[in-house]
Amino acid sequence: MNKYVNVTKMSITLNNAVAEELTSIAEELSEKKSHLIEKALMYYFDALDESLADKRLKELENAKVKSIPADEVWKELGL
């Protein structure tokens, strides 16, 4: 079975300091650089999700957006 199923090859550009740090850490941990980048992005996306959730909560608290009751959503979806 091909281990590269459901992956996308990408080419990225990093500044030299970041690239050197990545190479150094990858060598020390015996990890592939792509794996470290993927893990770092997942942590970053988690942090962004938290920031977006905080932003949306503040918008609700400040009445900038309106919430829709779950029963209305279910009714509209026919559930």
Image: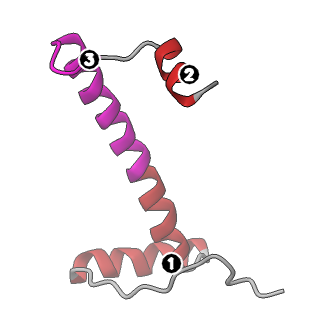
| Magenta stretch in the rendered image | 44-66
Dots 1, 3 in contact, CB < 8 A: no
Mark drawn on residue 66: 3
Which of discs 3 and 2 lies nearer the camera? The answer is 2
> How are the colours assigned in the image?
secondary structure
Of the image marks 2 and 1, the number of the one nearer the N terminus: 1
Q: Quadrant of residue 18?
A: bottom left
**What residue is at 47 percent from the left and 72 percent from the top?**
25
Q: Which amino acid type is shown beneath numbered disc 1?
A: Ser
Q: Quadrant of residue 10?
A: bottom left
Which of discs 1 and 3 lies nearer the camera? The answer is 3
Q: Is residue 37 shown in magenta?
A: no
Of the image marks 1 and 3, the number of the one nearer the N terminus: 1
Q: Which amino acid type is shown beneath numbered disc 3?
A: Lys
According to the picture, the residue beneath numbered tag 1 turns out to be 34
**What residue is at 30 percent from the left and 36 percent from the top?**
52
**What residue is at 33 percent from the left and 83 percent from the top?**
12
Which element is circle 2 on? helix
Between residues 27 and 53, which one lies in front from this camera angle? Answer: 53
38 left or right of 49 in image? right
Q: Which amino acid type is shown beneath numbered disc 2?
A: Trp
According to the picture, the residue beneath numbered tag 2 turns out to be 74
Dots 3, 2 in contact, CB < 8 A: no
Q: Disc 2 and disc 1: Cα gap in Å?
A: 42 Å
Q: Position of residue 23 (x, y in %)?
A: 42, 81
Q: What secondary structure is the stretch in magenta mostly built from? A: helix
Q: Is residue 60 above or below residue 48?
A: above
Quadrant into which the C terminus falls: top right
24 left or right of 66 in image? right
